[in-house]
């Protein structure tokens, strides 16, 4: 019994030590996928030929979105994940598989978003609202995206979700659950808060361009800043106001 307990403690210590490395590797591979144009260039070539949205093309677009979400969102979730790994290691009932379960559940939530983004992309393409680079081809649509993102940035629900993302200690203090099942549930909950915080910002990829690497990187950096630095709440409100003004400026010439 004692030997089994010691073995579990060793596994938990090892898991905590490698969590950061594994997390960094997943983020790096996801960004490499984006930077090399995997999926994106194929998607753009297919769009130039106006492809039918068959199963193969739909899966291509889904995985493009999913890897992009992993690359953009995992850096801002890293403090929560690393704290979870630490608390799991300190917990007498901690599981060596809990961290993987937590991350998997978080990524699963963004996989669900990627399904919706793929469906939305299909609808926009069919409506001729996207250019071949998957950015807005219509001033009113583009301006509406900016205004919607700005209004969401200023909404109480956005800031309620952001508050949870910015307070990992509070999140675990009020909702800690043991075991792999508990880790899955906490990962889903954190993923849901993260999605509520950022989903409209991710929709801005349809404005600046899904294939515009600078736009993608800029949004990822902004999300990280909003969640990590002390003035994140105020920055979110300021950016919200700027997005509304920007959107009105985009729409005005089309009226």
Image (tube, rainbow, N blue to C red):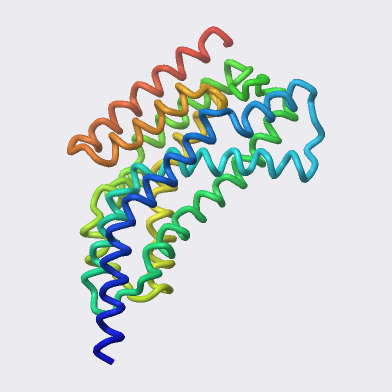
Question: In the displayed structure, does residue 65 sit left or right of residue 81?
Answer: right
Q: Which percent across, then down, holds residue 95?
A: 35, 74
Q: Outermost residue, bottom direction?
A: 1
Q: Nearer the viewer, residue 223 or 3?
A: 3
Q: Nearer the viewer, residue 18 or 47?
A: 18
| Vertical order, 147 against 3 (above or below) | above
- Residue drawn where x is 17% and y is 38% of the image: 230
Instruction: Look at 41% across and 36% down and name the residue there.
Output: 152
On the picture, is 179 further left or further right than 130?
Answer: left
Of 83 and 251, the residue lying toward us = 83
Q: Quadrant of residue 170?
A: bottom left
Would you say 131 lies left or right of 7 here? right
Q: How many numbered tags mark residues here?
A: 0
Tell me if residue 207 comes above or below residue 197 in the rendering. above
Q: Position of residue 2 (x, y in %)?
A: 24, 89
Q: Position of residue 245 (x, y in %)?
A: 39, 18
Q: Give me the residue at 34% from left, 31% from top.
A: 222
Give percent across and percent down for residue 166: 26, 47
Residue located farthest toward the left when viewing the structure as drawn = 230
Tell me which corner region of the image, top left, top right, bottom left or bottom right, holds residue 103. Answer: bottom left
- Residue 73: name its quadrant: top left
Q: In the rendered view of the protein, which quadrant contains the C terminus?
A: top right
Quadrant that contains the N terminus: bottom left
Residue in view at x 31 percent, y 45 percent: 162
């Amino acid at each position: 019994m004692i030997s089994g307990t010691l073995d579990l403690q060793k596994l938990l210590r090892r898991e905590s030590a490698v969590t950061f490395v594994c997390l960094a590797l997943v983020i790096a591979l996801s960004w490499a996928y984006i930077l090399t144009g995997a999926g994106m260039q194929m998607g753009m070539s297919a769009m130039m030929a106006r492809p039918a949205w068959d199963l193969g093309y739909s899966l291509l677009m889904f995985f493009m979105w999913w890897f992009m979400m992993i690359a953009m969102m995992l850096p801002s979730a890293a403090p929560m994940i690393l704290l979870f790994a630490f608390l799991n290691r300190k917990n007498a009932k901690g599981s060596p598989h809990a961290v993987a379960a937590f991350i998997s559940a978080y990524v699963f939530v963004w996989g669900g978003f990627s399904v919706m983004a793929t469906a939305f992309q299909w609808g926009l393409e069919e409506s001729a609202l996207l250019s071949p680079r998957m950015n807005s081809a219509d001033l009113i649509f583009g301006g509406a995206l900016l205004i919607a993102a700005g209004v969401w940035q200023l909404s109480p629900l956005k800031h309620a979700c952001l508050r949870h993302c910015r307070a990992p200690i509070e999140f675990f203090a009020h909702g800690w659950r043991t075991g792999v099942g508990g880790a899955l549930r906490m990962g889903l909950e954190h993923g849901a808060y993260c999605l509520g915080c950022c989903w409209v910002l991710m929709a801005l990829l349809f404005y600046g361009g899904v294939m515009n690497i600078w736009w993608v990187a800029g949004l990822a950096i902004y999300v990280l800043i909003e969640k990590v630095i002390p003035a994140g709440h105020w920055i979110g409100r300021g950016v919200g106001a700027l997005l509304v003004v920007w959107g009105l400026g985009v729409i005005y010439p089309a009226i």
